[in-house]
Amino acid sequence: MELRMDGISVSLSGRDLVRDLSLNVGSGQVVGLIGPNGSGKTTALRCAYRALRPTAGTVWLGGEDLAALSLRHSAQSVAVLTQEDGTDLDFTVEEIVALGRTPHLRGNQALSAREREVCRHAMERLEVLHLAGRSVLTLSGGERRRVLAARMLAQEARVLILDEPTNHLDVRHQLDLLSLLRGSGLTVLVTLHDLNLAAAACDRLGVLSRGELVASGTPAEVLTPRLIREVFGVTASVVPHPLTGDPQLLYSLSGSPSLENG
Ligand SMILES: Nc1ncnc2c1ncn2[C@@H]1O[C@H](COP(=O)(O)OP(=O)(O)OP(=O)(O)O)[C@@H](O)[C@H]1O
């Protein structure tokens, strides 16, 4: 299922937070949105999962205008992992993950055996099954993040939108979550601050700077020393990963690398 942002602009409190953003996430593609703090990444994502109505432009989901779909219909198709963890309720892990099934249920309908299995599998995949009976209030930041990722998976949506999903995760769980996204066959739009992980996990990257899309393409096309300097104000060397060939950025605290190649 394709997700397409078409000329999205967002103005709030007299400021243009996103200007004329067009970005296509093809069916089964993983597209990363990168950019400095405050460049509009979260604002753009919020438009794509209906937390915010764009001032102009249209979000298309599978060729239909997202704003014209019922909330239930779009929630069946789009699952979200936001930056705020939103788990201040004293629910168990199992209960939180089961909330992922809400768009598929009517009223107080109980989960079917298949749905319970979907939730169990999601918890197993995110390595939180052993926490099933624990209150989420007692979990570490990384454990909570994985519980919310399990809830997102349990929703069985064809489109996933994730805002900084690797926050709080240790390196193994970061790699595990991104390889899960990569191998899922789902349509994925994700913001990431770690540009090396973005290069490894994404088919294409879009770069936001001051609310505008300033570059898009494959990681190798986008992640050049010049773009990193212009957009992030940082000097970086770009080298191919020795195993995968993905572009990888090397930084130095002194900001004067000797390997710069572009
Ligand atoms: N409700 C709001 N009212 C006014 N300004 C807002 C509002 N929400 C966000 N902003 C501003 O819009 C800009 C873009 O914010 P956004 O959260 O989209 O950036 P971001 O690229 O996701 O940043 P970060 O990398 O820090 O998460 C920021 O300057 C932010 O302060």
Image (cartoon, helix red, strand yellow):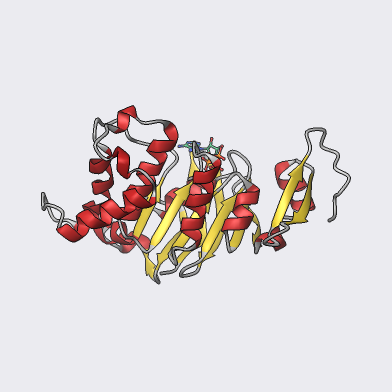
Residue 97 x/y as whole percent: 28, 46
Q: Left or right of 249: which side holds 61?
A: left
Q: How many marks?
A: 0
Residue 104 visible at all: yes
Along the line of sight, the residue nearer the viewer: 128 or 209: 128
Relative to 217, say whether 81 is above or below: above
Residue 9 visible at all: no
Q: Quadrant of the C terminus?
A: bottom right
Along the line of sight, the residue nearer the viewer: 244 or 86: 244
Relative to 99, say whether 2 is above or below: below
Which residue corresponds to the image point at 61% horizontal and 58% vertical from the top-left? Answer: 205
Residue 167 x/y as whole percent: 50, 39
Q: Left or right of 260: which side holds 64?
A: left
Residue 84 x/y as whole percent: 41, 37
Q: Left or right of 184: which side holds 223?
A: right
Residue 235 x/y as whole percent: 79, 43
